Image (cartoon, grey):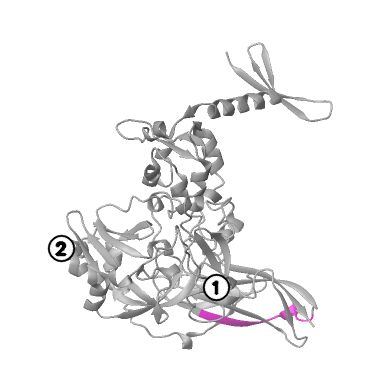
Amino acid sequence: MFTQIFAKRTRLGGLVLSASIGASFLTFDRLTELRYQDVDEKRNKFYTQKEVSERDGTKGKPLWVTYKDGVYDVTQFQKEHPGGKFLKQAAGGDVEVFWKKWSYHFSSPKLQNILEETRIGTVSDYDEKLSAQIDDPYVREPKRNLRLHKIFDFKPFCTETFPHVLNSSYLTQADALYVRNHAPVPEYDDPAEHEIAFSNESVEQCVLLDDILSEYPKVSVISVLQCAGNRTSRDAKASGPNAFSGTIFEDIKDGMVGNVLWEGIRLSSVLNRIFPQECAAEQSSANLMWHVIFEGDDEYETSTPLAHVLKASNDCILATKMNGKPLTPDHGYPVRAILPGVAGARNVKWLKSIRLSREPSDSPWNQNYYRKADGSHIQKLRMQSIILSPEEGETITCNRHDDKIHIKGVAYGVDSSVCKVEVSIDGGFNWMEATLLTDEILKDDSVGSYHGWVRFVADVDAGTIKDKAIVEICALARATDSNGNVQPQVSTKQRGYLYNGWSIVQFKRVKN
């Protein structure tokens, strides 16, 4: 026996879906009714919290969890869950405690469907009052200057910096730098007691941060910090939907980036002293042997190849200061990893452990996110130029005698510095070389090429549009580095990550 689904026109011109099962017919209304009957059957099966707790996924038992008054069998879903092992923390119990911390669940468009699909019953002894008493782990978040940011989420706090704020200075002030948190900001009663655990496959040792800092010379490194998802909305506009589409982050423009003077100690020096054999073997091998796994006090974890960290010209550091002051809570106080030229997701904040592993981190962020289209892990950033002024959609009022279009922005390379930025206002038919403000670049202790950005300015002749009272303009920018690499018009699709196509800004110019 088989099922046929077909549609017939009603007198009102609408469609009625029907299903033929043998000789019986089910209207769309009847199908909907049966669906709700199925939902009701799930809700009418009752389990005590004790019965749920016995299904904790151990010794071949199913893995059940509760949320509010619902009971959910996530035995199969745990294998697909992006959070991997974190789902097991709630095994046999209430997931809401953990969702309060990993609160992206509450803004995930997929959550309701998953809940509906995995629900098997109702908690018979559910106490709504007790559920309401679950503490909010975000209640003690640090104070922030919200005027400088476009906010995507408060729990956890995720932002990008407004273009005019980035355009205002060579170094990005600490309270203006974009924030990408995955959980509540950790608190420290006594930072002087903060330890970092160093481990390999056989040994672990915990060292006080103050002791580490006292043993190595301090260095400063100016470096761009950029989220791998920066400009993802530009990617979608250029080549269609990506992994960010339909999420709260789909409208990230150009502001998940900043330029900071970081201070700390060289990470390679620390690792060479603590893991001399592994580091020596890595440096003498032609193949990648080890990965450095960084974990923060927020439980966020990721990894980077040891070979990259050990290379002197990469200038990787354990940073404790930014722009001459201690790190702010949102940016990793008391210590974070800074890996110049590497995606922000690898620059772990609130460091609590550093371990060497033969394999990359198996955390959900490393296994399910921050990957390219071919599945490889995202590490290095790409060369960029970004127009910051005028801003997208802005109306610029100028003097009637002003025949120039004034464009400002920033540009940066990865393995080599940017040596040229060009701008165009006629769709790329004609390009004008911008002026690079290299005189304002500060000296630091970098061994490799300069890791920060350079600001650029260009006064483009308005040409045939100079006499128009009101005109729509599309400004373009592209960068070239010292190795001759040119920023592409549209970059290769990488699931929405690492977009570095030409910077494109549309605005209106009005003469008064």
What whole-number distance in Å separates the C-alpha atoms at marks 2 and 1? 46 Å
Q: Quadrant of the C terminus?
A: bottom right
- Residue extending farthest right: 11
Amino acid type at mark 2: Gln
Q: Is residue 284 in view from this perspective?
A: yes
Q: Hey, which quadrant is residue 469 in on the image?
A: bottom right
Quarter of the figure that contains the N terminus = top right
**Residue numbers of the magenta segment:** 455-467
503 in the magenta segment: no
Question: Which one is nearer the viewer's eye here, 89 or 424?
Answer: 89
Residue 316 showing in the rendered view:
no
Q: Is residue 263 left or right of residue 492?
A: left
**Image marks 2 and 1: residues in contact by CB distance under 8 Å:** no
Question: 145 left or right of 54?
Answer: right
Q: Residue at x 25, y 62 (%)?
A: 197
Horizontal and vertical percent position of residue 192:
29, 72
Residue 186 in the image: state x and y as whole percent: 40, 63
- For label 1, the residue is 145
Q: Which residue is mark 2?
A: 277
Above or below, 341 against 56 in this view is: below
Task: Give the x, y percent position of residue 443.
Answer: 38, 85
- Counting from the top left corner in percent of width and height, residue 341 is at 40, 69
Label tally: 2
> Is 327 left, or right, of 216 in this rendering?
right
Q: Looking at the image, which residue sits at the far left?
A: 277
Up/down of 178 relative to 464, above or below:
above
Nearer the observer, 42 or 311: 42
Please determine whether, in this image, residue 210 is positioned above or below residue 197: below
Q: Earlier in the sequence, mark 2 or mark 1?
A: 1
What is the secondary structure assignment of the residue under circle 1?
A: loop
